[in-house]
Amino acid sequence: MKLGLMLPVKPDIRWVLARQVGVEYAITKAAPELSGQLPPWDFESLHSVKTRFAEQGFRLWALEGDEFDMSRIKLGLPGRDEDIEHYCMMLRNMGRLEIPLLCLNFMAGVGWYRTRVDLPERGGALTSEFDRAAMPPEPELKLSHEELWSNFEYFIRAVIPAAEEAGVKMGLHPDDPPIERLCGYPRILTSAAAFRRALALAASPNCGVTFCQANFRAMGEDVPALIEEFCRKKQLFFFHFRDIEGTAEHFRETFHDNGPTDMAKLLKLLKENGFDGILRPDHTPTMATEENCEPGYAMLGNLFAVGYIRGILDALKTIEK
């Protein structure tokens, strides 16, 4: 298994800290509003991103999230074919630059969503919460679930040939929170059955799963059984290491060692099932001395998580000897 961190596309102190704790693999979002450059469908733009990481000792392993505005693709609007062609260009660029993984989602209209981002966690750290009861009444759906499924099918079948040609794996991320509708938009990747449907539509070894453990837990799924299933089918490409307490309708993020899940057991299960992909900590609380300006992505919690994960992985190696 490879241990990586989600790092900003531009160098800052987080890059320095990541290297100091021994992280060698980077995951980033290279969208133009973050990079100040063209989206990664432009080869020179993506090449410069990879070069910056390499100069600081990182192997850029994955892009994560919407790397440019995906609304026309997700909502089936005029112009989506142009955007899909840009998406294919991005995949080809990733292949040329040996960036092997793309973590994508199909959350239409609104991405990951929380109703509160300042909930006290252990020792007064600040974490996030989703509480359906705290939201205003849901507006009418802007499109149906089946229309969104149709848009996903149109998209994935158009881009998979480019991914296969480029040798890039595409790991689908669950909807977060995994509920049926949010802010007037349908959500479709909200269950294991939905993932099986999505992967069947793609029908490609290059389309698999970003296994965000906390989301599958929130769905009420059997997480260990799903890990075994997706590993057996060689569909588990990326593991997001995080935990929550609660259900899809009402949950809070926890420190990685302070939730209800036996996280060490999950890493052991990944190892036993031959997972050799990349994992990263996700959605860490904001700790003392940090500004709560990027809820879920504060650096001190990530550093704690890196040590926690590395300790578990080292223990697993010791047990094997």
Image (cartoon, rainbow, N blue to C red):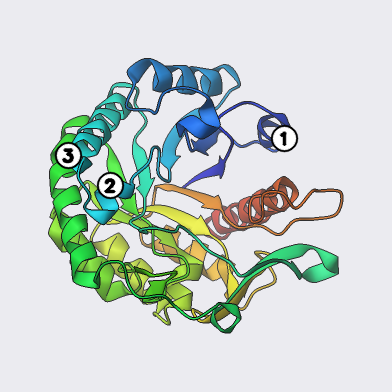
Considering the numbered disc 3 on the image, is that residue within a helix, a strand or a loop? helix
Pointers 1 and 2 in contact (C-beta within 8 Å) = no
Q: Which residue is mark 2?
A: 72
| Precedes in sequence: disc 1 or disc 3 | 1
CA gap, disc 3 to disc 2? 9 Å
Q: Position of residue 46 (x, y in %)?
A: 41, 23
What's the residue at 29%, 21% (across, down)? 96
| Dot 1 alpha-carbon crowd within 10 angstroms: few under 14, some 14 to 19, many 20 or more | some
Q: Nearer the viewer, residue 145 or 105?
A: 145
How far is disc 1 from disc 3 in space, using C-alphas? 41 Å
Q: To which quarter of the image does residue 246 belong?
A: bottom right
Q: Which mark is residue 278?
A: none
Residue placed most toward the observer, 288 or 34: 34
Q: Position of residue 39 (x, y in %)?
A: 39, 28
Q: Which residue is mark 3?
A: 81
Q: Amino acid at mark 2?
A: Arg
